[in-house]
Image (cartoon, coloured by chain):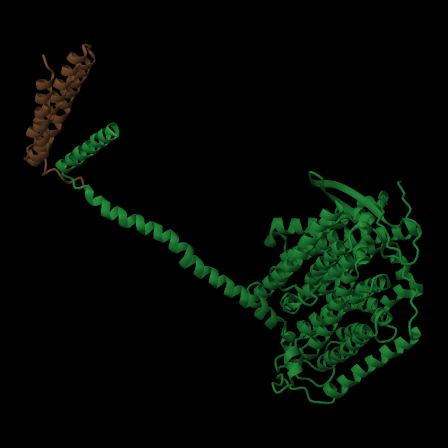
Chain colours: A brown, B green
Amino acid sequence: MSATPFLVLSAILFTIGCVGVLTRRNAIVVFMCVELMLNASNLALVTFSRVHGNLDGQVAAFFVMVVAAAEVVVGLAIIMTIFRTRRSASVDDASLLKY
Amino acid sequence: MGISMSPVLSEGAVPVVAPSSGDGVFSLLWLVIALPALGAAVILVLGNRRTSAWAHLLGTATVAGSFLLSLVAFFALLGRDEGDRSVGQHLYTWFEAGRFTADIGFLLDPLSALFLLLITGVGGLIHVYSIGYMAHDERRARFFAYLNLFVAAMVMLVLSDNYLGLFLGWEGVGLASYLLIGFWQHKDSAAVAAKKAFVVNRVGDMGMVLAVSLIFATFGSVSFEGVSEVAAGASEATLAVIGLLLLLAACGKSAQVPLQSWLLDAMEGPTPVSALIHAATMVTAGVYLVVRSNFIFERTELGQGAVVIVGVVTLLFGAIIGCAKDDIKKVLAASTMSQIGYMMLAAGLGVAGYAFAIFHLLTHGFFKANMFLGAGSVMHAMDDDVDMRHYGALRKALPVTFLTFAMGYLAIIGFPGFSGFWSKDKIIESAFGENLWIGLAALAGAGITAFYMTRLMIMTFLAEKRWAPDVHPHEAPKVMTVPLMVLAALSVLGGLLLLGGWITDWLAPVVGVAEHHVLPLPAIAYTLIVTATVAVGIAVAWVFVMKRDIPREAPQEVSFVTRAARADLYGDAANEALLMRPGNTMVESLITFDDHGVDGVVDGTGSAAMGMSGTFRKVQTGYVRSYALSLLSGALLVVLALLAVNLV
């Protein structure tokens, strides 16, 4: 079975996530797009693991998952706090830290 | 007792310093320095207020103790054989660095013994006089501390057996003179004069430092003993440079042209200080240095010639200035300059003149201290007025001062029989023996000296009263007049030192034996010529000063020469034009360069960085999405770069 469809899917998912991060204002959506990119890369890692016939890629995928879980915890907490103080989840509103 | 007999000197040979080790009374030599130094330390540490009751007694007692010790040492030296009158004492090693050793040691030989007596003796009399003179000054204790310091430093200068120790005393004298000239520092003029003396002396000290360094580099030693042994081996050029540098140093301390400008301003100090500077300490140091370094000067004709020229120029320079001054102390200061010029001239003549330079130095020490203290007594009587145009007819009001001053006056002009007569006559005679023109210049100096000193006498003690209405002159107290009397007696009798050629024989082990000069004329002829010239000087003063009215205000319609002399022959103007203004211009251009050049580069770098960061900080927008975009573009760039590298 060819690896190409998996890699193409992975690329498509990554691109969707990427565009989402750059264009959407809602912090939750941006956050979900980040998750999408992480999982796209997980897919690519697992595919390559399969192609090469070893477990390196799968191990890496597990690491990414753990990091993603941790990130969710911290990220959602930050988003919650921002929302509480500003009554808004728009990332463009939180732009005080600048020149 | 280790005795190293110096060989009997032949004519014209340069003696080598070869001291024997000192014991007995000579082992107490350090006390001569330590006593006044201790006096100064005690008074300064305890402070003016706590010591004011007894500081003057302590100060005078320490110097008197030094004088007694010097006297004992002198007689002990006198009792020795002629070849063994040089005693060395190594005290301790100051510091060592490689080949270089700095020892603190003393050398008592006929030369330093005479200086010891002069410094502590005349210095002691000046201390006694100061008790009365400074009685109403609330900082008298401090004054005595400085006087003691001055004496200690000067004794260190003449007693040291090496150039480094001499330099130590040399600097100490400079410091003490600074403190004393500026003693009344609340007066701007005194503070400025002190600073000027210090700065001008620094120029001379520079010469001293270079000379000592060069001496060490050349001879590998800085002790008189070590240098005099090997001085013959050095090249003529090196010796000439050392000689000229030593002369520069001597010019600074002895106020010789071109470093003469500080001396007249130094009159801002209290009068006893002027007496101390002019008679016993400070200005004599230059002459001492030249005579002490005879083993160097004897071997460099250039150096000796320079000393003679400096001496001749200064003796005329000072004499001319003295003619135009109305400030009694400045006349005396100018005359000091002139008389030290005589000593320099004699010292430059070599073996023929060394002894006479020292002889004149001693007699000058007596009569100049006498006259300065006398001038102090006059000022005391005239409410600190120094303008001779406000004096006149003081002989009746101040009989003791008048009589003692007259002794000094007769001595300085060279009235037959008085001390100055013998010493100056000998110098002029030696000058004629060297060169007709030098002799004539010295002779002219004697005539001018007679003129301005007679002018001073007439304006101060003779003629008619020109006092301010509220002045009531009174004779000074005993504590001031007794030193005057002692010094007057010395001014009269100082010539006895020449009796039977004693002083030349006494100094021969240090400076060598003069070759017998054949003078073009018999010695008595020179004496007559000098006396006649002096008489002319007196007569001119009598006609132009005594026989005319002396206005209370100095006339302004005067000749060019008088104007020049009143302005110290433009010595200050020359310094200003040649040194101060170019210096100022240089400093100003350096400041401009610093402000615009160096600061421009530094400030430019700073503002460039500021401008750039001002531009680049706009990148920090605060929008998370723009950061994400730059992250992405960065990542894309890296990927493209990797691809490009892999494809090539």
Q: Is residue B54 visible?
A: no
Q: Is residue B238 visible?
A: yes
* Residue closest to the far front: B648
Q: What is the tally of numbered marks visible in this picture?
A: 0
Q: Quadrant of residue B280?
A: bottom right
Q: Quadrant of the N terminus of chain B?
A: top right
Q: Residue at horizontal 35%, vertical 50%?
A: B605
Q: Position of residue B456 (x, y in %)?
A: 72, 78
Would you place residue B347 above or below residue B599 in this image? below
Would you place residue B622 above or below residue B421 in this image? above
Would you place residue B325 above or below residue B176 in this image? below
Q: Position of residue B573 (x, y in %)?
A: 59, 72
Q: Position of residue B484 (x, y in %)?
A: 77, 68
Q: Residue at horizontal 86%, vertical 64%?
A: B352
Q: Nearer the viewer, residue B428 or B168?
A: B428
Q: Nearer the viewer, residue A99 or B66?
A: A99
Does residue B255 appear to the left or right of B629 in the view shown?
right
* Residue closest to the far bottom: B548
Q: Quadrant of residue B623?
A: top left
Q: Quadrant of the C terminus of chain B?
A: top left
Q: Position of residue B642 (x, y in %)?
A: 24, 29
Q: Residue at horizontal 73%, vertical 71%?
A: B313
